[in-house]
Image (cartoon, rainbow, N blue to C red):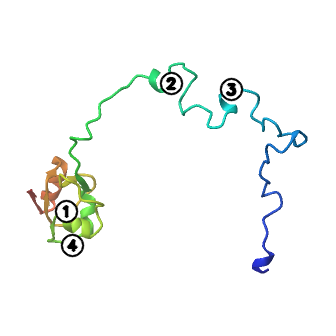
């Protein structure tokens, strides 16, 4: 088979609807738009969510909740089980974790260490926040924590 022999599969292409080409075509005169009204005019139609003057659903539903995203403290998060990938005696900080691709992006408020999993390495961990369980597990493994 050559490039000039390629063609679409049977019935996979459909001719465009040709409107306004006389009454015999079935789509003459009003071109399938009906007689009068907003949708028969060019540029006609209503915006998304418009319900004919009835109060739209989006405005009928109550607004709930509170959004504190502007002032929320966002940390780069790491679990203690992820720290097992590092060598014994390493000084762990946010830059090292980013370099080793253990965390994605460095957030504004620094690093938060969570206590999920077990730690088998003796590490010195520098972070902004430690959970109690993370602190216990690091110290139990013989490591140290430093709050920045």
Measured in 3D between alpha carbons, the distance from the residue under mark 1 to the one under mark 4, in whole angstroms, is 16 Å
| Quarter the N terminus occupies | bottom right
Residue bearing mark 2: 57
Residue 115: x and y, percent? 23, 52
Q: Which mark is residue 37?
A: 3
Residue bearing mark 4: 87
| Residue toward you, 118 or 83 | 83
N-terminal of the two: label 4 or label 2?
2
Q: Are marks 3 and 4 in contact (CB under 8 Å)?
A: no
Quarter of the rendering containing residue 13: bottom right
Tag 4 secondary structure? loop
From this view, report whether residue 127 is shown above or below residue 46.
below
Residue positioned most to the right: 24
N-terminal of the two: label 1 or label 4?
4
N-terminal of the two: label 2 or label 3?
3
Q: Which mark is residue 127?
A: none
Q: Residue at horizontal 77%, vertical 81%?
A: 2
Q: Are marks 2 and 3 in contact (CB under 8 Å)?
A: no
| Quarter the C terminus occupies | bottom left
Q: Are marks 3 and 1 in contact (CB under 8 Å)?
A: no
Q: Tell which tag, 2 or 3, sits nearer the viewer.
A: 3
Measured in 3D between alpha carbons, the distance from the residue under mark 3 to the one under mark 1, in whole angstroms, is 64 Å
N-terminal of the two: label 2 or label 1?
2
Q: Residue at horizontal 61%, vertical 32%?
A: 45
Residue 33: x and y, percent? 74, 34
From this view, report whether residue 32 is shown above or below residue 16.
above
Q: Tell which tag, 4 or 2, sits nearer the viewer.
A: 2
Measured in 3D between alpha carbons, the distance from the residue under mark 2 to the one under mark 3, in whole angstroms, is 24 Å
From this view, report whether residue 69 is shown above or below residue 38.
below
N-terminal of the two: label 3 or label 1?
3
Q: Neighbour class for label 1 at 10 Å: few (<14), some, many (≥20)?
A: many
Q: Residue at horizontal 76%, vertical 28%?
A: 35
């Amino acid at each position: 088979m050559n490039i000039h022999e390629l063609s679409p599969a049977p019935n996979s292409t459909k001719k465009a609807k040709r409107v306004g080409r006389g009454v015999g075509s079935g789509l003459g005169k009003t071109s399938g738009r009906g007689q009068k009204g907003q949708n028969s005019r060019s540029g006609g139609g209503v915006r998304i969510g418009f319900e004919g003057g009835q109060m739209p659903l989006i405005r009928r539903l109550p607004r709930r909740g509170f959004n504190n995203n502007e002032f929320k403290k966002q940390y780069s998060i790491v679990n203690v089980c992820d720290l097992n990938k590092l060598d014994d005696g390493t000084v762990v900080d946010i830059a090292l974790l980013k370099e080793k691709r253990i965390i994605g992006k460095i957030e504004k408020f620094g690093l938060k260490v969570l206590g999920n999993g077990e730690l088998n390495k003796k590490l010195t961990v520098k972070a902004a926040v430690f959970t109690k369980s993370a602190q216990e597990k690091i110290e139990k493994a013989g490591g140290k924590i430093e709050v920045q």
